[in-house]
Amino acid sequence: MDIQLSKHVALVTGAGEGIGRGCALALAEAGADVVVNDVNPVTGQATAAEIQKMGRRSLFAQADVSDARAVQAMVEAVQREFGVLHVLLNNAGFNLFKNLEQTSLEEWDRIMSVDLRGIYLVTRGMLPLLKIARGASVVNIASVHAQATIADITAYAAAKGGVVSMGRSLAQELGKHGIRVNTISPGFVRTPLLDRWLNSEPDPQASLARVNGFHPLGRIGTPQDIGNLVVFLASDYSSFISGANITIDGGLTARLMH
Ligand SMILES: NC(=O)c1ccc[n+]([C@@H]2O[C@H](COP(=O)([O-])OP(=O)(O)OC[C@H]3O[C@@H](n4cnc5c(N)ncnc54)[C@H](O)[C@@H]3O)[C@@H](O)[C@H]2O)c1
């Protein structure tokens, strides 16, 4: 299957690092022009520069996805530069390892604002440009924590559960415009976010070996693994897939404790 996304314009939120960066590069590799969003201008511009070096058009759009005004400015920039959007990857997000008593109201609101409201704001803002594409693909990044989770991560699990539910309803709402909406639920993926958790462990190397061992494939995922699925969901090869929540975790959540 040779996936060609030339003449496609994609927007990836949180594309300065980690999964977002990997997906932005994978989309560009397949031929797409990519709008790189991030709140961090240094990493965001670096990803955009990498994409330009590949011979694609790229625009860096700095915005905190939870900030309605900043998102509106990003919408206007994409409208001016490209006038259409074929692929929207809502990836920006962060997690919070805190129990209920440790989670402040501000922290609860912040995670809901970025991980959940951000998808609402960016998708709503980009909708006119997605409609113009006639067959656009929206992909939202949730997490396996929406299906099976652990203690002391309630706010994140709740936000990601919301992302999965939002995708199911949106797929029905936007189907009439030819827009497909799908959710990806990754398991462990090697990114700066995961490294922050590993580095908070007493022995990061031992923790990584333990986590690798949870997986039937013996390893955690890479941003490229997620990028491959995003490229497929962006392409016509997935033209009958909508409203799905696709787990990509190397078999992690197929496991029963035994
Ligand atoms: N890494 C994992 O194991 C894993 C597993 C499941 C789901 N996820 C999800 O994947 C997504 C990406 O995670 P990652 O591991 O690549 O994280 P990361 O922290 O490595 O990278 C996230 C990127 O998003 C940007 N970002 C953060 N908040 C933003 C905001 N408000 N507006 C715009 N950009 C913002 C950051 O600057 C960074 O460049 C998140 O939604 C995360 O919840 C990650």
Image (cartoon, rainbow, N blue to C red):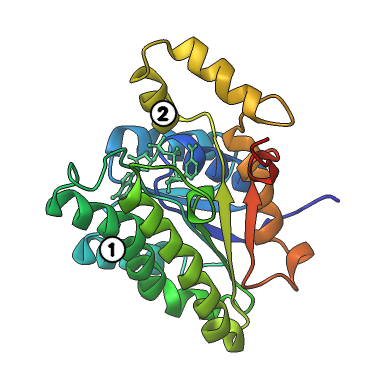
- Quarter residue 44 falls in: top left
Residue at the spot of label 2 = 192
Q: How far apart are marks 2 and 1 (CA)?
A: 24 Å
Name the element at disc 2: helix
Q: Which of the marked residues, 2 or 1, is nearer the chain's N terminus?
A: 1
Residue occupying image coordinates x 47% and y 30%: 191
Residue occupying image coordinates x 59% and y 77%: 179
Question: Furthest residue to the bottom?
Answer: 176
- Up/down of 53 relative to 174, above or below: above
Residue occupying image coordinates x 42% and y 21%: 198
Whether residue 84 is visible to the viewer of this picture, yes or no, is: no
- Up/down of 200 relative to 250, above or below: above
26 relative position to 201: left or right: right
Label 2 CB sits under 8 Å from any ligand 1 atom: yes
- Quarter residue 26 falls in: top right
Residue at the spot of label 1 = 71
Residue occupying image coordinates x 30% and y 32%: 42
Q: Residues within 10 Å of mark 1 (few under 14, many from 20)?
A: many
Q: Check disc 1 and give the amino acid type.
A: Val
Q: Check disc 2 and give the amino acid type.
A: Pro
Q: Residue 118 in the image: x percent, y percent?
A: 33, 61
215 relative position to 93: left or right: right
Q: Residue 69 in the image: x percent, y percent?
A: 19, 65
Whether residue 128 is visible to the viewer of this picture, yes or no, is: yes
Of residues 33 and 236, the one drawn nearer to the viewer in this rendering: 236
Of residues 8 and 137, the one drawn nearer to the viewer in this rendering: 137
Indicate which label's residue lies in the foreground, 2 or 1.
2
Q: Residue 59 in the image: x percent, y percent?
A: 41, 50
